[in-house]
Structures are given as structure tokens and as C-alpha cells.
């Protein structure tokens, strides 16, 4: 037969274990919410990055177009001048300038084409990033909602369990509670059975004094504790 005090301690221990498990779950909720929020932030950042890339390329394209414009102006000025000069060497010098400027324009046009390909790619990336967020956002938001609801229901369960813990502590003597709390403070279980002469907590052999105390055969009626790990031990018949 289990001593009544141990029965009460085991009930308390069971409720404390449930309370602690709830506390662990409650602590995980904000972390889980933060992880989902991070995913949303990362997807938004991908959209921003694609948008910035696109803006950068469009600016580059405008600059190249301006350069092409001024090179073409220069080219038409050279052509007009060439048609007006009389001297052969001047004519040839202008011909050389025309050739150089035409070459520069071709190079700029090639650059512009590359930038335009880049713009097409960036537009695709931007659309893809936007589509990804759009596809995921309701799932992300739903997940956050579920997590918040879970947090609220865990809080309610925890409050109820705190009440149950208090109710389990009520009938216990102050000295027994103090001993239990000291052991439980190092981690549960605080009350363990002796099986095969060994402590159910540290699995080491208990002394015969502890074993008979746990059997309720000691004279002082004090709670028995393991010689090795100091947990409360009880005899399980
Ligand atoms: Zn032990």
C-alpha cells in the first residue's frame, strides 16, 4: 500500500509535469510565429530585391539611350561638316570621327540590348517573387492565426492546471511540500519508485535503510529519499 502522503505527492507531481509541459509548449508559440513572420519578410525582401534590380536596369537603359542620342547628334554634325569641307585632309579627319562615333554607337546599342535582356529576366524574377508571396501569404497568415489561437488555449489550460496544482498542494504538509519543491526544482520526477532495489530516478541501488523506510517500516515516519540522487522514493508492490 502506498502511504497517503505519497499518493498525494504523486498527484502533485503528475499535475506539475503537465503544467511544465504546457509551459514548454507556450514558450514555443512566439518562436513559431516569429519563424512564419520571417518567411513572410524573406518573401517580401525577394520582391524588393527584384524591384530594385529592375529599377537599376531601367535607369541604366535610359543612360545608354541618352549616350546614344548624343553620339547620334555628334554623328550628324560630323556628316554635315564633312559635306561642307573642301580640303581632303579635313574630309578624311571627319571621316575618321564618323567611323569612331558609329563604332561607339554600335557598342552602346549592344550594351542596351544586354540591359534589355536583363530587364526581361528581372521582370520574370519580380513576377515570380510576387506570385510566390501571393500564393503563400494566406497560408502564412492562417498559420499565424492558428498559432495565436493555440497560444490562447494553452494559456487557458495552463491557468486551469495551476489551479489543479494548487489544489493538489492543499492537503500536503508544509515540510513535505518543501522537500518535494527542493527536489522538483532540479527537475521532475521528484518521486520515483524503487524497483529491484534500485532508485527509479538514478537507477542506483538504494541502501537497505532507505528501502525499509520506503516500505514504510521506519519508525520516524519521514519520507524516504534516495542515498544517491536525493529523490523521494516509494515502494511499489
Ligand atoms: Zn536515486
Image: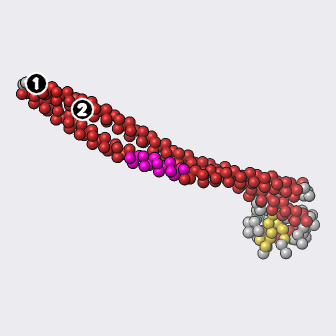
Question: 128 and 20: which one is in front?
Answer: 128
Res 191 → quadrant? bottom right
The C terminus, quarter of image: bottom right
Q: Which mark is residue 47?
A: none
Q: How far across and how far down the image is residue 94, in percent?
A: 14, 29
Q: Is residue 23 above or below residue 11?
A: above
The image position of residue 163, as x and y in percent, is 85, 54
Q: Residue at x 83, y 72 (%)?
A: 236
Residue drawn at point x = 16 percent, y = 27 percent: 80
Is residue 189 toward the left or the right of residue 82 in the image?
right
Sequence order check: which comes first, mark 2 or mark 1? 2
Q: Which residues are magenta?
A: 120-134
Instruction: Specify the quadrant of the image occupied by residue 154.
Output: bottom right
Q: Which residue has dot 1 on it?
A: 85
Q: Residue 25: x and y, percent?
A: 70, 55
Name the quadrant where ligand 1 sits. bottom right
Q: Is 130 contained in the magenta span? A: yes
Amino acid at each position: 500500500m502506498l502511504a497517503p502522503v505519497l499518493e498525494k505527492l504523486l498527484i502533485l507531481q503528475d499535475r506539475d509535469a503537465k503544467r511544465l509541459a504546457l509551459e514548454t509548449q507556450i514558450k514555443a508559440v512566439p518562436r513559431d510565429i516569429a519563424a512564419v513572420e520571417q518567411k513572410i519578410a524573406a518573401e517580401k525582401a525577394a520582391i524588393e530585391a527584384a524591384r530594385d534590380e529592375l529599377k537599376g536596369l531601367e535607369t541604366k537603359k535610359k543612360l545608354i539611350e541618352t549616350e546614344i542620342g548624343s553620339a547620334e547628334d555628334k554623328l550628324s554634325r560630323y556628316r554635315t561638316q564633312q559635306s561642307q569641307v573642301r580640303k581632303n585632309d579635313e574630309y578624311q579627319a571627319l571621316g575618321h570621327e564618323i567611323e569612331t562615333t558609329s563604332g561607339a554607337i554600335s557598342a552602346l546599342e549592344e550594351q542596351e540590348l544586354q540591359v534589355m535582356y536583363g530587364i526581361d529576366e528581372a521582370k520574370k524574377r519580380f513576377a515570380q517573387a510576387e506570385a510566390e508571396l501571393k500564393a503563400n501569404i494566406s497560408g502564412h497568415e492562417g498559420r499565424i492565426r492558428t498559432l495565436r489561437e493555440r497560444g490562447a488555449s494553452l494559456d487557458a489550460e495552463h491557468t486551469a492546471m495551476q489551479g489543479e496544482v494548487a489544489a493538489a498542494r492543499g492537503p500536503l504538509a508544509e515540510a513535505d511540500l518543501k522537500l518535494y519543491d527542493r527536489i522538483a526544482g532540479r527537475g521532475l520526477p521528484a518521486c520515483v519508485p524503487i524497483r529491484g532495489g534500485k532508485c527509479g530516478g538514478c537507477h542506483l541501488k538504494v541502501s537497505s535503510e532507505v528501502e525499509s523506510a520506503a516500505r514504510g517500516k521506519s519508525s520516524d515516519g519521514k519520507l524516504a529519499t534516495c542515498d544517491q540522487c536525493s529523490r523521494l522514493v516509494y515502494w511499489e508492490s
